[in-house]
Amino acid sequence: MSAVVKNKFGLGPKKVLVLHGWFGASVYDNFFDSFNADEFEFALVDNPGYGAAKSQSPAKDMTDLANILLATADGLGWSKFHVIGHSYGGAAGLRMATISADRILSLTAIAPVMPSGFDETAAKNCNADANTGPAFMAAYAKGPRAADGPRMIAAALDPVLANDDQALQSLIDSTYDAINEETYKQYFLVWTGTSFVDEVKGLNTKSLFLIGKNDPFAAVNYVTPTANSMAPGAVQIKEIDGGHFLTVTGRYCSIEAIKSFLI
């Protein structure tokens, strides 16, 4: 199995591998247009089972995905690079750093899944119960416009997005274009079951955890234990307006925060 570079932006010396989460790469549509093309080169990746890599089998777990993404960087000829990751893409970036810390120059983790996966704190944040997991697993089959389909999940994770029906539906339609039900279910298991808490302890990778004030899941109380377990001063936590899909609902502030961090 392998990932595929979906798009590249810019020709600059700063190489940035851009990783998506469960709902796919459309969260980055036009996101990098205002970045200096002479300073940065962004490579937006489709994970195995998504988009340009739809024919590939999904990753088995977060460690498998991290190794696949490191191999993708190898294919680009990048020995050292920065990582931007949304949602479980943030967890993938952290896992890449624990495997090959010397290669990851920095990590920007946007509304990130943590090495503890869908832990007790996340469950409490989301008011999850025994029915939540089965409902989320069954959601894809309900269809892109169903009230109890993935729209329900996206709206719950991002109340700001829920108030923009056109943007919400565009995200969901793009997700259905990018993945099938098997991929949807497998990556739900991958991100909820993420578990590399011990491996991240003492990690000194320069990191920005970008958190949406309206994100019930990846809140400050969820990301702080990981930040505290890493090397002192390695992690900056920045909270901005927006929900879980910060590149959409907190677009301007996200761009400005990332530009400042990558100086």
Image (cartoon, rainbow, N blue to C red):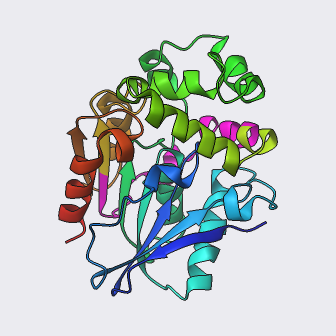
- Residue 197: say if magenta: yes
Q: Is residue 233 something that shows in the picture?
A: no
Residue in front for this viewpoint, 89 or 173: 173
Question: Height in image: 57 above or below 144?
Answer: below
Residue 223 drawn at (x, y percent) = 36, 38
User: Residue at horizontal 59%, vertical 10%?
Assistant: 129
- Specify the quadrant that holds the C terminus: bottom left
Q: Is residue 214 magenta?
A: no
**Residue 64: x %, y % from top left:** 69, 59
List x then y, in percent, for residue 225. 36, 37
Q: Nearer the viewer, residue 35 or 136?
A: 35
Nearest to the observer: residue 209 or residue 228: 209
Q: Look at the image and give the residue range highlighted in magenta.
A: 185-208
Residue 141, position in %: x, y? Answer: 78, 27
Question: Residue at image x 27%, y 70%?
Answer: 35
Image height check: is 184 above or below 97?
above
> Is 13 left or right of 154, judged from the image as shown?
left
Above or below for 218 versus 2: above
Can residue 120 be seen at all in this image of the molecule?
A: yes
Residue drawn at x 38%, y 52% is 109
> Quadrant of the image for the N terminus?
bottom right
